[in-house]
């Protein structure tokens, strides 16, 4: 690099430097069937999610190996709302079909895992949706997990009852 002895020389060097475009444009990632695949995680739950253009059907594979509608699998309205959030943020409600399998954890963690997987798969299928999903925080894995039980404790932090006598 050239010797720069003054602030003016530094400004001139910066002005003369070639302008680098933003980050390279992302290419859509799709398989031979026109789907995008992503893995979502939350607590102990892991969801494998496939997204393809369609009419907004969301199918989840239950423990018997059959695909059921998300409204039947996640009976609570709060969990259904969690699954719809990525589509609402990206303004693509009813435009994509989703197929997913979920393992581990409870229903709340599974709903979060499916949401994370849908967000990741949407951003791979259509990279222009990525900024909206990222701004909403849907592409980041929620790292909160259950704290482990410690030796000499009744639970993770709870001690045994103290007895003076």
Image (cartoon, rainbow, N blue to C red):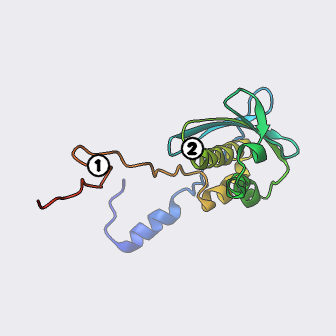
Viewer-side label of 2, 1: 1
Q: Earlier in the sequence, mark 2 or mark 1?
A: 2
Q: Secondary structure at mark 1?
A: loop
Q: Give whichever of 1, 127 is nearer the camera.
A: 127
Q: Residue at x 57, y 54 (%)?
A: 20
Residue 6: quarter of image: bottom left
Image x and y of residue 18, in percent: 55, 56
Q: Secondary structure at mark 2?
A: loop
Q: Residues within 10 Å of mark 2 (few under 14, many from 20)?
A: few
Q: Residue at x 66, y 30 (%)?
A: 63
Question: Gap between marks 2 and 1, in whole Å?
Answer: 23 Å
Q: Residue 106 shows which numbered tag?
A: 2
Q: Dot 1 corresponds to which residue?
A: 154
Q: Residues within 10 Å of mark 1 (few under 14, many from 20)?
A: few
State yes or no: discs 2 and 1 in contact (Cβ < 8 Å): no
Image x and y of residue 149, in percent: 32, 45
Q: Is residue 156 left or right of residue 20?
A: left
Q: Give whichever of 158, 16 is nearer the camera.
A: 158
Q: Is residue 56 left or right of residue 118?
A: right
Image x and y of residue 163, in percent: 16, 59
Q: Is residue 88 left or right of residue 140?
A: right
Q: Is residue 82 left or right of residue 95?
A: left
Compared with 6, 145 (above or below) is: above
Image x and y of residue 115, in percent: 65, 49
In the rendered image, which quarter contains the C terminus? bottom left
């Amino acid at each position: 690099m050239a010797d720069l002895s003054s602030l003016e020389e530094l400004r001139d060097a910066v002005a003369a430097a070639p302008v680098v475009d933003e980050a390279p444009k992302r290419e859509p990632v799709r398989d031979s069937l026109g789907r995008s695949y992503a893995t979502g995680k939350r607590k102990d739950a892991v969801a494998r999610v496939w997204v393809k253009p369609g009419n907004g059907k969301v199918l989840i594979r239950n423990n018997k190996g059959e695909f059921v509608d998300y409204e039947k699998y996640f009976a609570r309205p709060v969990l259904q709302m969690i699954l719809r959030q990525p589509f609402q943020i990206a303004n693509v409600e009813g435009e994509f079909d989703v197929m997913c399998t979920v393992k581990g954890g409870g229903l709340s963690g599974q709903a979060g895992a499916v949401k994370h997987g849908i967000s990741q798969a949407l951003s791979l299928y259509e990279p222009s949706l990525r900024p909206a999903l990222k701004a909403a925080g849907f592409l980041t894995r929620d790292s909160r997990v259950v704290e482990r039980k410690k030796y000499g404790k009744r639970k993770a932090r709870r001690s045994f009852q103290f007895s003076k006598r």
